[in-house]
Amino acid sequence: MPEKLKKYSLQSYDEKTLDSLIESFYDGIMFIQNDIITRVNSSFSRITGIKEEKVLGKRVEEFDGEEHICLRTIQEVTSLVKKFGKSMTGMGELKNGNEIYVTATPVKIGGDVKHITVNIRDVTELKLLKEEVSRLMTLYYSTPEDARLSQLTGSEIIAENKVMLGIIDMVVRLAQVDTLVLFEGESGTGKELLARLIHRLSARRKGPFIPVNCGAIPENLFESELFGYAKGAFTGALKEGKPGLFELANGGIIFLDEIGELPLHSQVKLLKVIEDLEVVRVGGRNPIKLDVRIITATNKDLPRMVKEGRFREDLFYRLYVVPIRIPPLRERREDIFPLAWHFLKKFNKKFNMSKTFSREIIEVMESYRWPGNVRELQNVIERIVITSDEDVLSPKHLPPSIYQEEMEDNGLIQVKGIISLPKAKEILEKKLISSVFSVKGTTTRHAARLLGVDHSTIVRKLKKYGLRTKIPPFEAS
């Protein structure tokens, strides 16, 4: 190296800059001088769970290796470094079961080992990160069909689940034809979002999109709100009358959400509007022709309501031209992480923050049932982004209703008798694996990720306990 460049390099790295460089390492770093620990970075605490003040200023051999297995590994490799005077690597395990590699490197002064630098790498964490990167790269290099859907739907509709991708593809095709569509599914699954997608991709995109929540309109105002009213139709009415929501949607789309809440007497009039595409205002006589597409949605069991006489059979079959069931989020768990990541980026930008997810919080979110579906997930992400005081979001930042439920469901082990440890291990393994696969849509790869083991281990255990006799070839490979 030229003398001028060498001089510049030495002057550039002052103590403050070196501190920043050490802190920037993703791996844990420990400096040892004359057997005394003089420095650790924040990644050391993140990986090992051991606070900085517990190790600084102490001798390596003082630590209780039984209490912290990772410290025992550090003791072993540093001892070998002092003995052989060269870099040594050992493998250990953390309390949470993660595998770590510990590399100790000597710094010799006058032939003696005066300083040792220790590097701690969480191999399990890196494997999971690699899986996530692979997952994201698969999305990036998606098939032309997936790319086409992504381009058409924009950034608001996120899906990896095959059923959901099939629904989006159907919605894109339905946008090109003026036909009745009925979205069925629990609240919060994104029915209105898909209806808006139909509007945006259809020939009616320049016309209005009028969303109507049928459950939010008082029964006595239903007809006047939907169909409008004529001049002087009732006391308190506007002198000039008022157009209804169907008239306001002319040239565009009207989206009737929660159609199951429609009163029986209004169902008759709605049926006539659908069949004749014209509306008569309350108190009026002259029919008004409509140019409107009708899309409906419900979270009710309409066939049961028909049997119970709470929904007209003729209206049901008129609406049931193209029914599309939107699966709840618990049936498409592969969508949870992409959706959560999408919302995190959205709220980071909105609130000028830079939060990120820990591996643990992703696992908790992917195993939670999300009764409120995508809407609940979005609200939870917004809440923890605003309320957490740390940049890395962990399970403790989740609402107690989510984190405590997971702890109660997954963390409770009761012992009522004495059995051998091998037998106890088999019972627990079988119960845990059965629990994971009790959730519809869980794949062997997803189960392996939740349980923190290799994919091949899950396949082997399934065969051992006879929990699944048929494993799809693409999963078992």
Image (cartoon, rainbow, N blue to C red):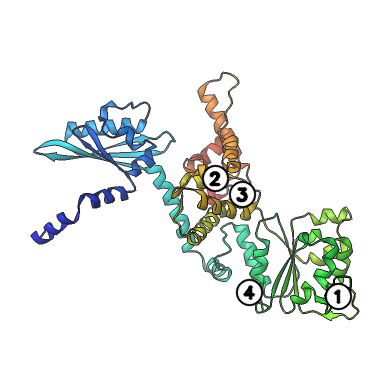
The residue indicated by pointer 4 is: 201
Q: Position of residue 38 (x, y in %)?
A: 24, 37
The residue indicated by pointer 1 is: 281
Asked if disc 1 and disc 4 are in contact, CB closer than 8 Å, the reply is no
Q: Earlier in the sequence, mark 3 or mark 4?
A: 4
The residue indicated by pointer 2 is: 398
The residues bearing labels 1 and 4 have C-alpha atoms spaced at a distance of 31 Å
Circle nearer the viewer, 3 or 2: 2
Circle nearer the viewer, 2 or 4: 2
Residue at screen point 29% across, 34% down: 74
Q: Which secondary structure, mark 3?
A: loop
Asked if disc 2 and disc 1 are in contact, CB closer than 8 Å, the reply is no
Quarter in which the N terminus is drawn: bottom left
Q: Earlier in the sequence, mark 3 or mark 2?
A: 2
The residue indicated by pointer 3 is: 441
The residues bearing labels 3 and 2 have C-alpha atoms spaced at a distance of 24 Å
The amino acid type found where label 1 is placed reads: Arg
Q: Earlier in the sequence, mark 1 or mark 4?
A: 4
Does residue 148 appear to the left or right of 90 in the view shown? right
The amino acid type found where label 4 is placed reads: Leu
Q: Nearer the viewer, residue 167 or 308?
A: 308
The amino acid type found where label 2 is placed reads: Leu
Circle nearer the viewer, 3 or 4: 4
Q: Which secondary structure, mark 1?
A: loop
Does residue 288 appear to the left or right of 61 in the view shown? right
Where is residue 382, by image quadrant? bottom right
